[in-house]
Image: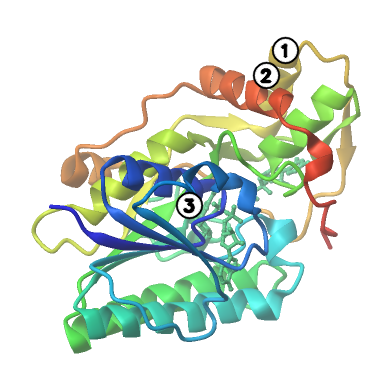
Amino acid sequence: MLKRILVTGGAGFLGSHLCERLVEMGHDVICLDNFFTSQKANVMHLLDRPNFELIRHDITLPIWLEVDEIYNLACPAAPGHYQYNPIKTMKTSLMGSINVLGMAKRCRAKVLQASTSEVYGDPEVHPQPESYRGAVNPIGQRACYDEGKRAAEALFMDYHRMNGVPVRIVRIFNTYGPRMHPYDGRVVSNFIRQALAGEDITIYGDGSQTRSFCYRDDMVEGIIRMMNVADNFTGPVNLGNPEEFTIRELAELVVELTGSRSRLISKPLPPDDPTRRRPDIALAKSKLGWQPTMPLREGLERTIAWFRSIDISHYRPPTPRY
Ligand code: NAD
Ligand code: UDP
């Protein structure tokens, strides 16, 4: 059945690919974005499609639309971006959630929240299952994002229990791919950009910390499956690639794949940087029949090809990390 679908944060890295997929499926797609961390170029190719509409709007402010489904992705996601204005980040998670949940309640729409592995903080349980409640520093630099996303999950479940709003919560682990903002400060974009420019590759700390990297297309497939899951299953469900790498291994792989002569250098580890992270995806496998298919090497090759194809001067300069 074709639906009217709102994607908040729809011009972003994940949102733009999600919009593309939904437009291809024939749905009527409304992309809402304030372009804080993205640009219109990400969705330019969709503008002449009859079933695609773009609205510049800030989701912390109410908006009146009629829709059947909402994917709530609006929120800066990279540490450098969400720490740029931490108060605004928290507002976006909280007021943005309240606004989309109110809309869902009024329209009897289904609404999916893009939550994050950051709700687990610097985890003491490894790999992380959904039942793990996390170890988040509530007053640290990452709290605006982590606690904002945790509060958003609480709001989603309360609207579900109190008002019967059909909700879906996905906890997204590190995802990479074409259309990442080249200056977002995330590890994959930093390393590729630095390697291609022949600059030093900045490893924070000793590079022994781990992450698990999921390719964009796998992630968007998981998100769409979760929206369409049967049985009123609300989640939260982890979505991510369970293959775990140290940051140093990632740097070495990027150097190899780009053929770069960049050196690996050490920079201070930012505060509260999680030591390790790997999703337990047993629930996603059983409920959604989903698991990632793209190996890191191939996903990086595709991402590097995209970075080579763009004119980096079209992107806004980096936001400060601290
Ligand atoms: P992104 O920064 O590319 O996308 C976020 C989008 O939201 C941007 O287009 C931005 O302009 C928009 N936005 C921000 N604040 C807004 C506001 N107040 N009103 C309207 N639009 C606003 O990041 P992404 O990686 O595509 O992340 C998308 C979602 O997935 C985010 O909610 C993020 O927290 C979540 N997530 C992503 C990852 C990842 O590794 N990519 C991991 C965990 C969670
Ligand atoms: N990192 C790094 N060099 C960089 C950027 C990031 O070593 O230039 C590290 C960072 O300290 C963290 C990991 O890479 O341990 C992933 O960072 P990212 O900002 O991509 O996302 P996070 O998972 O920390 O939210």
Does 187 appear above or below 77? Answer: above
Question: Residue at left 20%, top 87%?
Answer: 163
Q: Amino acid at mark 3?
A: Gly
Residue indicated by mark 3: 15
Q: Amino acid at mark 2?
A: Leu
Tell me whether circle 1 and circle 3 mark residues in contact (CB < 8 Å). Answer: no
Kindly tell me whether mark 3's CB lies below 8 Å from ligand 1.
Answer: yes
Question: Considering the image in quadrants, where does the C terminus appear?
Answer: bottom right
Q: Is residue 259 left or right of residue 160?
A: right
- The answer to whether the residue labelled 2 contacts the one labelled 1, judged by CB atoms less than 8 Å apart, is yes
What residue sits right under mark 2 in the picture? 253
Q: Nearer the viewer, residue 29 or 268?
A: 29
**10 Å crowding of disc 2: few (<14), some (14-19), many (20+):** some
Q: Earlier in the sequence, mark 1 or mark 3?
A: 3
User: Considering depth in this image, is 169 or 136 the residue closer to the camera?
Assistant: 169
Label 2 element class: helix
Residue 307 spot, x, y in % from top left? 70, 29
Question: Residue 201, position in %: x, y?
Answer: 84, 31
What is the C-alpha distance between the residues marked 2 and 3? 27 Å
- Residue 213 horizontal side relative to residue 192, left or right: left
* Residue at the spot of label 1: 256
